[in-house]
Amino acid sequence: MTTPNRRTFDAAFKLQVAQMIRDQGLSVMQVCKDLGLAESPVRRWLAQYDAEQLGQPGLGKPLTAEQQRIRELERENQRLREDVSLLKKAFGLLRPRTEVIQRIIHQWQEKASVTRLCRLLSVSRSGVYAARRRRAAPRPCALAAPVQAAFDASGGNYGSRRVREALNADGLMVGRYRVRRLMKQLALQPRWKRKFVHTTDSRHDLPIAANVLNRQFRPAAPNQAWVADITYIRTDQGWLYLAAVLDLYSRKVVGWSMAPAMPAELVCNALQMAITLRQPKPGLIVHTDRGCQYASHAHRDLLAKHKLVASMSRKGNCWDNAVMERFFLNLKMERVWQRRYANAAEGIVDINHYIVGFYNTHRLHSTLGYQSPADYEKVSH
């Protein structure tokens, strides 16, 4: 009897899954269901990711799935105890009218079941549902159209957080949970997929730079630290390779180049574009992985010509270039995996439009206080 082949995942895929859960506030159960993964390894990836974010790589053994589950249950129990204590104090001071109790149950039903709330408030569940049935048919919500418009403007990629921030920026002050309810009613769900293939080839004898950046992902000003990497895009006629350079200060893509092949010239073109547009001063850090393109003589000579400092990730450690990996994941979830490119030229046009027409100028970044990279640079400098 043969056993099924065990699935294996590289470090970059694990990083993407962990960041997806943390950044988008998704549940482990939902992500595992969508990606066809078991919960135990995903929880281990999360524990490792959290440790890495605290600057503790390799310190101690990551929590097991059972330990992680127990910790989450303990936190949930603490929240429930606080909720019960708050409700008891409030209702001990004043017994609200029935309609007030109905309103409280409606506001809290996202955090607890109606049955539990009725038990805490000492009201009958049947009475609550009867009152709901007596209500008049709801009128169309005035926010439905703005929510739909903000979602459509993002290309169908924004979740409730970013839709809320887009509405607030337009002067419509509304809470995230109300936006989430409206998006659910309107069947608006951000689109994302689940593929990743690592493209780095570090099997070479070329010189390797030290990890100068050392995960200092929040420089104080523009043009102090850039990160760069290569990814691939599938077309009907073969692969299209994208080399990109991103300024860590504003998360703005400042240089990029695309071609059906992946020579050293590709990464040099992207870097030269960034240098031409940004005119950085000597000493700027340019961090990359250990790929042969970035270790090539041509790339090192270009850095030396402009007195820029080379920095490379540690061997096998994709977390050292996590910000660039995140950009590529956003690009693929929000654009590439929603398209089918007939050829390289079609892909180049669409990806240029994503970078120039959306990512740099309109996409809201939680790291930037829900501003676009362009707006963040204007406000801060």
Image (cartoon, rainbow, N blue to C red):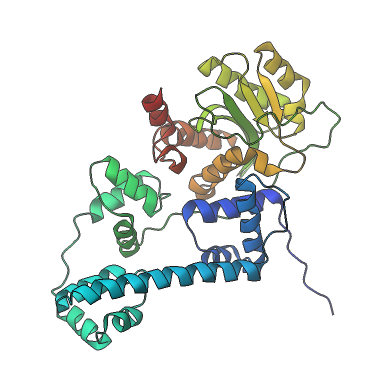
Residue 100 visible at all = yes
Give the x, y percent position of residue 47.
63, 57
Q: Residue at x 35, y 72 (%)?
A: 85
From the viewer's perspective, is residue 98 above or below residue 29? below
Residue 150 coordinates in the image, percent (x, y): 32, 47
**Towards the viewer: 155 or 255:** 255
Q: Position of residue 331 (x, y in %)?
A: 53, 42
Residue 28: x and y in percent read 55, 64
Left or right? Give the position of 214 relative to 277.
Answer: right
Residue appearing at x 59%, y 55% in the figure:
17
| Snapshot quadrant of residue 90 | bottom left
Q: Is residue 286 above or below residue 73?
A: above
Taking the spot 41% from the left edge, 58% from the top edge, the residue there is: 189
Relative to residue 86, is residue 316 drawn left or right? right
Q: Is residue 72 above or below residue 364?
A: below
Q: Choose between 370 and 60: the one closer to the eye.
A: 60
